[in-house]
Image: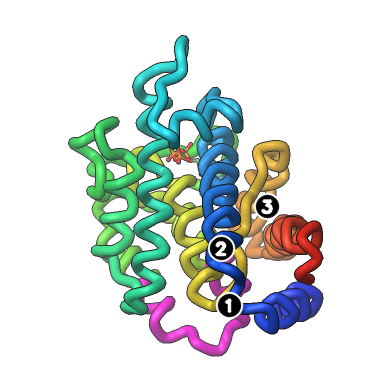
Amino acid sequence: MFADIDHLKSTLDTHRPLLPHLVKSLAEDLAIRWTYHSNAIEGNTLTLLETKVVLEGITVGGKSLREHFEAINHKEAIDYVYELCDRNEPLSEWHIKNLHGLVLKNIDPDNAGRYRCANVIITGASHTPPEHFLLNERMGELVAWYETKTNLHPIEKACQLHTDFVIIHPFIDGNGRTARLLLNLELIKHGYPPCIITVDKRLVYYEAIDDWATTGNRHKFLTLIHDCMMEGFGVYQKLGIV
Ligand SMILES: Nc1ncnc2c1ncn2[C@@H]1O[C@H](COP(=O)(O)OP(=O)(O)OP(=O)(O)O)[C@@H](O)[C@H]1O
């Protein structure tokens, strides 16, 4: 299912290392688009250009402080994802909590980086996340699965990490953004360009998670990620690299 992506990745790899100025501008462009789309999926109303301006340190009139923090925090969380990839440490619950801590920094200090102490329902979802007192156990199992599951294709593993995480929904808020950061952590670790689930695909994204959570059918989700990753290679195609 991912043979075409693996082919594009191999072609891209033959051009590495890319020129430093190209790496820098690609990384900046990616961080802005990733931040914009991931926050927009959760209802942040900053536009792509406003997100870019906020990440340059400028405030946008008429937008709440929270929306500003959501953009700034998300960029910090992306930086942390790259740092973790560089350090090549095994993923732990501590890393996941740190990532979430950045997502909710200055927004909800009581819950940033802490598993929820209450039960939650996900609006529109057929599936109910586990009760709060089971979270330590379920997250421990997720990380243990992640450590031992070495024979899965990296894209499938990234998808499963993302989806098992949102099915558990360990935090009171910020689960979606943290899950998409984890998805990309796994992809980047294996040398793939990050996958941006664009806001126009929000409904398909939610339906795909619901399918997976309720019937175990992963096809819709894997297809969505396949398509988003193919789109992600568009920028390299425009540059004539792949
Ligand atoms: N049926 C579902 N089952 C489990 N998780 C789902 C389902 N549908 C969507 N999600 C995930 O839950 C996220 C939204 O969860 P929620 O409404 O609780 O927001 P949140 O926890 O505030 O996190 P964030 O604001 O970053 O998403 C979505 O972005 C998606 O990743």
Q: Residue furthest bottom?
A: 151
Q: Badge 1 is on which residue? A: 17
Residue 128 % position (x, y): 47, 46
Task: Indicate left or right for 116 with 50 as reference.
Answer: left
Q: Residues within 10 Å of mark 2 (few under 14, many from 20)?
A: few
Query: Would you say the residues marked 1 and 2 are in contact, meaning their CB atoms lie under 8 Å apart?
Result: yes
Membership of 154 in magenta stretch: yes
Task: Indicate left or right for 102 with 63 as reference.
Answer: left
Q: CA distance from mark 3 to mark 1?
A: 35 Å
Residue 146 % position (x, y): 43, 76
Query: Which range is magenta?
Result: 143-160
- The dominant secondary structure in magenta is helix
Q: Quadrant of residue 216?
A: bottom right
Q: What quarter of the picture does the C terminus occupy? A: bottom right
Residue 53 in view in this figure: yes
Q: Specify the amino acid type for callout 1.
A: Pro
